[in-house]
Image (cartoon, grey):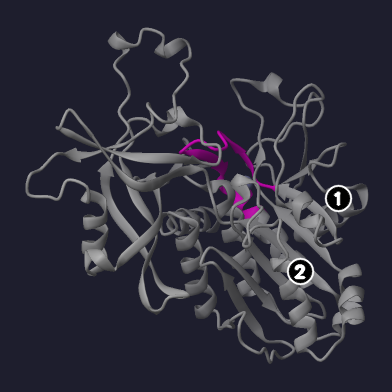
Amino acid sequence: MNKELKFAQNLIDFIYDSPTAFHAVGKVKEDLCKANFLEIKEEEKWNIKKGGKYFVTKNDSALIAFVVGKGETAENGFKIIAAHTDSPSFRIKPKPEIVVDNIYVRLNTEVYGGPILNTWMDRPLAVAGRVTLRGENILYPETRLVNIKKPIMIIPNLAIHMNKEINTGIELNKQKDTLPLLSMVNEELEKNNYLISAIAKELSVDLKQIIDFDLFLYEYEKGSIIGLNNEFISSSRLDDLAMVHAGIRALCKAPAVEATNVMVCFDNEEVGSATKQGADSNMLLNILERITISLDKNREDFLRAISKSFIISADNAHALHPNSPEKNDPTNKPYMNKGPVIKISANQSYTTDSNSDAVYELVCEKAGVPVQKFVNRSDARGGSTIGPISSTHLNIRSVDMGSPTLAMHSIRELGGVMDHFYVTKSFEEFYKI
Ligand SMILES: [Zn+2]
């Protein structure tokens, strides 16, 4: 197996171990600890050192890791890569069990973000997330991660005989058509506690200890390498765990240089980022200021550091689709396996300008990595990402980029083996500057 393929397989393993944003942060923490990063807490007094490696988490679902620069913060600033830990999914509602005809047990769910709904049909699904338990202090209940790694649910399609229109396009109702089937009514089990009983068993705690939960469905099957010559990565949650994986791997390898190198993994990008752990908060701003203060510098030094800083906002891009090439811009066509994609938009739904574009292009050039550009068709409105939202809190030069992928927001997205390797190489180069 060549090094690019091995690295793609490593990404698939990482995604498999990260079924939710909480688990992604848990896995990243594990990797950072192995690379000798030290965990520091928001509530503690910080005493960080030049050249030191640290990380801090927020809400168990976002994380900021950094290698403190050897230079002067005000002179050298921060070099930041930003990505997000969350992906579109279904969140389980409180009191979730719905019994049908006193026979079937379904779960009541709510859509999280914008999944391609029909890709979730007929797939073995598992459940994972965070469970909140009764603790010693009312203000600080205990939290535990849970992952029931079994295909315990499925959302069955309606047969073609009962839905003649199924192949010409049907609208799925989010309250009716996408609720997963969990079980058959079983007299031995308490009628209204199927799921919570399973969770309590998994965590070896008493049912009464569980107060609430943040639980999500995920695809049970692991991702795989696809293509006649092993060219592609097929997996859930490539958006945006591929960029989280690339950024964290690059930071773990990063030497201490003059600037402070930072990797930020925000949560809640898929629902607009407006949460305490999202890009539309002061989370990153506060952490950067605290790094400066902890190095015995003042607010002016911090603001000077900001003016010398740079952000790579890393979130996947759209490759040209072989079945629908007309959907892309006529002159800017990114393809899979041809390198990272810089995203550009006149209305600033991406932060890239010619200055920040040049910085990233030159980083790629130095790393020996090819680079491509994405612009929306002028008659189409594309998505946005963390870059523009983060920019409203931190006025730092910023470029939006990502790996070219197909089927974004499908339960199974498709990316290129070479692109993941290229992106990571470009990040390693950025952290070396
Ligand atoms: Zn994304």
Q: Nearer the viewer, residue 53 or 246?
A: 53
Q: What label sits on residue 285 in the rendered view?
A: 2
Residue 252 painted magenta: no
- Residue at 29 percent across and 11 percent down: it is 162
> Is residue 239 depicted above or below 254 in this figure?
above
- Provide the secondary structure element on which disc 1 rests: helix
Ligand 1 within 8 Å of disc 1? The answer is: no
- Provide the secondary structure element on which disc 2 rests: helix
**What residue sits right under mark 1 in the picture?**
357
Q: Amino acid at mark 1?
A: Asp
Q: Which residues are magenta?
A: 402-422
Q: Left or right of 393: which side holds 111?
A: left
Residue sticking out furthest to the left: 188
Residue 337 visible in the displayed image = yes
Residues at marks 1 and 2, CA–CA distance in whole angstroms? 23 Å
Q: Amino acid at mark 2?
A: Leu
Q: Give the class, few, some or many, for how many residues have Cα within 10 Å of label 2's Cα (few <14, many ≥20).
A: some
